Image (tube, rainbow, N blue to C red):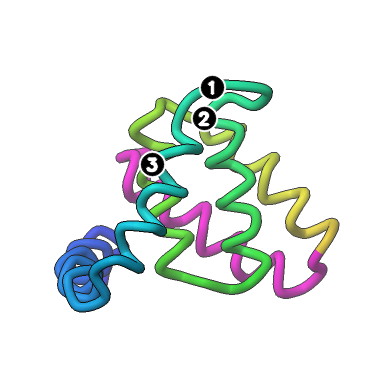
């Protein structure tokens, strides 16, 4: 299955889950919305951090959602790769394995594959 297909399959699941948990989903959504603008960090920098955390905790769906957001923002492959290099520095072998997945997802979602 491709990353695009996986992401397409996840979105309705997340939407259904959010509907089931109501106020909790709204609260989480408010947190996410509060981080979308630029302040001390740009929105793109925050998404790069989120991608790094997703790789570090090995959350493949999180990797896909944050990579998709970064593609929409016009993030370059080099910016993604440098973020993933920090993941390798901090996470060793698992950083390599999940960083590889994140870069492959970027390539597919951005059309650079």
Identify the disc placed on residue 69: 3
The nearer-to-camera label among 3 and 2 is 2
Q: Helix or strand or loop: what does disc 1 sit on? A: loop
- Contact? badges 3 and 1 (CB < 8 Å): no
In the rendered structure, the answer to whether residue 85 lies left or right of residue 16 reads right
Give percent across and percent down for residue 91.
Answer: 79, 67
* Residue 33 part of the magenta segment: no
Marks 3 and 1 sit apart, C-alpha to C-alpha, by 15 Å
Give the label, 3 or 1, closer to the camera: 1
Q: Extreme front residue here?
A: 23
Mark 2 nearby-residue class (10 Å; few <14, some 14–19, many ≥20): some
Which sits earlier in the primary sequence, circle 3 or circle 1?
1
Q: Magenta region: which residues?
A: 91-113
What whole-number distance in Å separates the C-alpha atoms at marks 2 and 1? 5 Å
As helix, strand or loop, the secondary structure at mark 3 comes to helix
Taking the image as shown, residue 81 lies to the left or right of residue 91, namely left
Residue 5 visible in the picture: no
**Which of 27 and 42 lies nearest the eye of the viewer?**
27
Crowd band around label 3 with a 10 angstrom C-alpha radius: few (<14), some (14–19), many (20+): some
Pointer 2 with pointer 1, Cβ within 8 A:
yes
Helix, strand or loop at label 2? It is: helix
> Which disc, if any, is residue 6?
none
According to the image, label 2 marks what residue? Answer: 43
- Label 1 sits on residue: 38
Sort mark 1 into few (<14), some (14-19) or many (20+) by Cα contacts within 10 Å. few
The disc, 3 or 2, on the residue closer to the chain's N-terminal end is: 2
**Residue 55 in the image: above or below residue 57:** above
Q: What is the CA distance from the residue labelled 3 to the residue labelled 2?
A: 10 Å
Q: Which residue is found at the position 37% from the left and 39% from the top?
A: 112
Residue 29 in sight here:
yes
Q: Reading the chain from its start, which is encountered first: label 2 or label 1?
A: 1
Instruction: Classify residue 74 by image quadrant.
Output: top left
């Amino acid at each position: 299955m491709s990353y695009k297909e996986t992401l397409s399959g996840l979105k309705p699941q997340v939407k259904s889950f959010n509907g089931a948990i109501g106020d909790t989903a709204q609260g989480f959504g408010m947190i996410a919305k509060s981080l979308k603008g630029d302040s001390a960090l740009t929105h793109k920098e925050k998404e790069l951090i989120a991608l790094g955390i997703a790789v570090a905790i090995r959350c493949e769906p999180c990797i896909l959602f944050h990579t998709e957001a970064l593609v929409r923002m016009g993030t370059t492959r080099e910016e993604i790769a440098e973020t993933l290099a920090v993941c390798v520095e901090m996470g060793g072998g698992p950083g390599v394995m999940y960083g590889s997945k994140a870069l492959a997802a970027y390539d597919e979602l951005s059309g650079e594959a």
